[in-house]
Image (spheres, coloured by chain):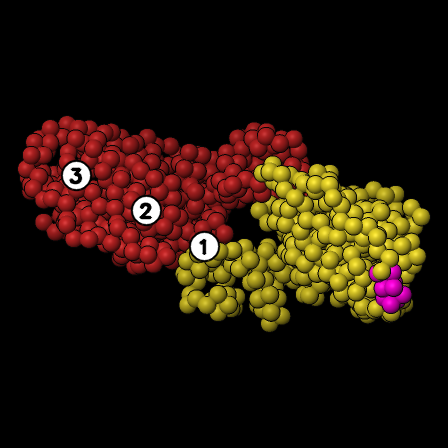
Chain colours: A yellow, B red
Amino acid sequence: MVQQPAENCCPAETKPDRKPAQCQHTGQPASERHAAGSGTIRQCPRTTLSLATAGRIAAARKNSHRSTPQYPLRSLDFRGRSRRLPVSETPVMPDETLLLLGIDGGGTTTRALLAAAANPAQILATGFSGPSNQRAVGPLLAMQNLDAAVNAAFEQSGLPRCTVAAACLGLAGADRDSDRGVVLQWASEARLADHVRVVNDAVPLLSAGTGTGFGVALIAGTGSLAWGCNASGDSTRAGGWGWLMGDEGSAWAIGSAVLKAVVCAADGRGPLTALAPAVCEQLQISTASDLVARIYSAEIPRALIAELAPLAFTLAGAEDAVASSIISNAGRDLAVMARTVADRLKLPQQLPLAAAGAVLTQQPALLQAVVQHLSHDQRYCPVVTVVHNAAEGALRLAAELHQQNS
Amino acid sequence: MVQQPAENCCPAETKPDRKPAQCQHTGQPASERHAAGSGTIRQCPRTTLSLATAGRIAAARKNSHRSTPQYPLRSLDFRGRSRRLPVSETPVMPDETLLLLGIDGGGTTTRALLAAAANPAQILATGFSGPSNQRAVGPLLAMQNLDAAVNAAFEQSGLPRCTVAAACLGLAGADRDSDRGVVLQWASEARLADHVRVVNDAVPLLSAGTGTGFGVALIAGTGSLAWGCNASGDSTRAGGWGWLMGDEGSAWAIGSAVLKAVVCAADGRGPLTALAPAVCEQLQISTASDLVARIYSAEIPRALIAELAPLAFTLAGAEDAVASSIISNAGRDLAVMARTVADRLKLPQQLPLAAAGAVLTQQPALLQAVVQHLSHDQRYCPVVTVVHNAAEGALRLAAELHQQNS
């Protein structure tokens, strides 16, 4: 069952500021609502695409002078074979039109934002491509997709592909030095930027969601992860172990719980639930006994199972007790991750929490469950910002990197 | 934590018979011990292989007169392609040397027992082959392995392959008419037996373990399943949904719980446990942070994870609280399956329980946990028989089938 929030989780002296928040990038007012009895949830609107300054910069097109590197660009793939890394033409822009790149890459898509260094809050163009999580698709395809996203951003801007002043890449699956080394090698060979920073995907999210860069970034989409940083620069994480070892609160975990509830109900081991007919309808089977054939004959059963997650939200809304319990448990699991990180970093009671990932940002019931579980004992009163575009945080970090080096 | 058993779970008037039990096949005394405070666990020894009557039967070898069928033996594989079914030479034995076949086929191995119809308790030969679970390996390979196990049994007996009087095949993955149809078609084309019965693998197990064929068969090995039958012939099941939807209490589920405990401890989300260094040692990694690379780069991570299950038993024995909790939870999950089946079939308090599967038969702590959870509220006082060779039950059912038709 969904746990009811404490009536007043925040002592008066520590209640979060109720003034309308502004997006730290655009200055536009952010929509704000108070999660049922606990904490604050702000929606950070997407920065609208503008090509206002593109004309000035486009004039630099004719000045592009650096050609594609001629030295052999090779790397090792997972099997140790030498492979040419994907590198596009990389002319260099003149100083007066310095550019920045902010990239957010995950297990499903990669998004690259292009902005002028003189005005990093003004996004010139956005490029999309496929997944760039090396752990999910291997380093070769991941680098190809990074390159494709950068190309797409330049193409949309009307500018020629060139070396930018600074780039920050926030990438899922880039937690180890060896992972980041692959990206840095590609960035070097592609002459991506004068200064490059590669971080895991939670770092730009925290930057986009909290402004200060301190607090907890909580992601629940294909996978799940909590990552935090405090004012001293200490950082830590919880979760992010992938679907075979956790990913609690993710679409996979919720879909998996839905399936288990349905088979337990079919056996008589668990309570009856409206999830059973809903799952049968979605999977186009007659009864739960057809599940074995349906699930194990699927080419990607993991995706099939994750796609069942929305049923839990729909039926929790219709007060199905089993579905409500699944959502509450998912919220509790995510709250435990966030709390673990916050405890270890000694973060304040008014906990800045940047929420991202398709499930957490598109299903308000899950975010409310997280907030309720986080604040139920008044240890934390989370101030939540929903981040739809973590690449904006990467762009912000690219701007900081440029400032540090200019 | 492991739950302590009730001191006296069985009222005096319903305590199970304490007389030394006999194996219903061999008449040999079965070893017996009383599970900690609750229920009775008997070990049914394997019927020893004897070729005492083989000489008489072998004399019939020269009388074999039916040749290999000449009509085309074809079937459809999973992709709808016409494939020749595996069929070996099938001469027929003269009536005075009628034989029986009992076959137990699972996701790992297939075992075929050969006996004379006149003395089905005396096993003439045993043949082994690979998996014959159609759901796991597809119908073509499953039928090839059934044929290979039968061939191996005949080869060991010194007899020529011939049509036997009756055969019973207890096969995992043979729950649906379409599954059984594939087996019956192969049996017909292979002229396996005059009378053939195909059942799921729990049916012979119950026959081997309870003598009466009534009670609950509980399997925990690669997967897990409870199947029961009452005196009225009603039957039902719980579990058996495979690793993506349950398999609670199986090696997979226990290994998976071990991994999750280790990553939670590494995050600070769960208590410290000696499972962490033990898992690192078994997987030959330095720290838990190497788990992602190790698990997701494994060709068959499912097998790698299932192989971690023994660590939980070892460390539960060394009083690691996390490991003990994992074993207790696995026992509880299996007990819930067995109880669900027993409740639905209105089985008696002195519940005949046939236990099988590598984990349940080789890890006494798990079986004790099952018994404790089943008997904690005195609703059931399970009388457990550990069955090491379910093919003996299939042979017994083959003998019954022969008697019904002779």
Taking the spot 93% from the left edge, 57% from the top edge, the residue there is A96
Q: Which mark is residue B161?
A: 3
Task: Give the position of the N terminus of chain A as an image quadrant.
Answer: bottom right
- In the rendered image, the residue lying farthest to the bottom is A318
- Residue A331 shows in the view: no
- Tell me the kind of residue under disc 2: Ala
Q: Which residues are magenta?
A: A53-61
**Disc 2 marks which residue?**
B142
- Secondary structure category for the residue under label 3: loop
Q: Same chain for marks 1 and 3?
A: no
- Tell me the kind of residue under disc 3: Arg
**Disc 1 marks which residue?**
A296
- Secondary structure category for the residue under label 2: helix
Between B93 and B37, the one nearer to me in the picture:
B93
Q: Quadrant of residue B32?
A: top left
Alpha carbon distance from label 1 to label 3:
36 Å
